Image: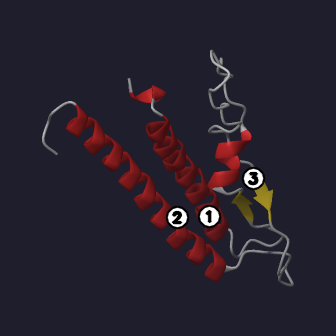
Amino acid sequence: MFQNIEMMQMARAMGQHVAQRQTVVARNIANADTPGYKAQDLQSFEESYRSAPLQPMRATNSRHIEAPDWSPGAARVLSQQDGISPNGNSVSIEEEMLKAAELKRSFDLSLGIYRSAMNLMRTSIGRRV
């Protein structure tokens, strides 16, 4: 039932993206002292969500609005080459900690969107929130 509601799909995709990116950030932090390790990151949620093709919708009337050309998609891993240390490692603990804080905010946002959608659905069927 919920998989057909765009807001729920977006909240779910955002939560999955945050989990994937948190894994990459944790891997970067774990390898901060590994010689030759290159820091990685995922593309932003907006880019990954809008990159996959959407199932085409049929327009039964010429006045219908065209379907958007974006949908949830898999995130792409990006390598970072800035600030390589003498041992060839490109991990910056400060940047990774900032990313972790950003991920916390993104997770809270996805959870808030999901809760809001659930409250809206409960209200629409006559239940109190």
Label located before the other in sequence (3 or 2) = 3
Label located before the other in sequence (1 or 2) = 1
Residue 103, numbered label:
2
Q: Secondary structure at mark 1?
A: helix
Quadrant that contains the N terminus? top left
How packed mark 2 is, by other alpha carbons closer than 10 Å (few <14, some 14-19, many 20 or more), is some
Name the foreground residue: 60 vs 23.
60
* Image marks 3 and 2: residues in contact by CB distance under 8 Å: no
Q: Is 38 left or right of 125, judged from the image as shown?
A: right
Label located before the other in sequence (1 or 3) = 1
Quadrant that contains the C terminus? top left
Instruction: Identify which amino acid the numbered label 2 is placed on.
Output: Leu
State which mark lies toward you, 1 or 2. Answer: 2
Rendering coords of residue 8 (x, y %): 44, 38
Task: Please give the name of the residue rendered at 33% of the width and 49% of the height, measured from the top-left corner.
Answer: 116
State which mark lies toward you, 1 or 3. Answer: 3
* Image marks 1 and 2: residues in contact by CB distance under 8 Å: yes
Instruction: Identify which amino acid the numbered label 1 is placed on.
Output: Val
Q: Is 61 left or right of 18, judged from the image as shown?
A: right
Toward which corner of the image does residue 49 lie, by quadrant? top right
Task: Please give the name of the residue rendered at 81% of the width and 67% of the height, measured from the top-left corner.
Answer: 80
How does the figure colour the protein chain or chains?
A: secondary structure
Residue furthest left as drawn: 128
Q: Which residue is mark 1?
A: 25
- Looking at the image, how many numbered discs can be counted on the residues? 3
Rendering coords of residue 9 (x, y %): 49, 37
How packed mark 1 is, by other alpha carbons closer than 10 Å (few <14, some 14-19, many 20 or more), is many
Q: Which residue is mark 3?
A: 77
Rendering coords of residue 124 (x, y %): 24, 34
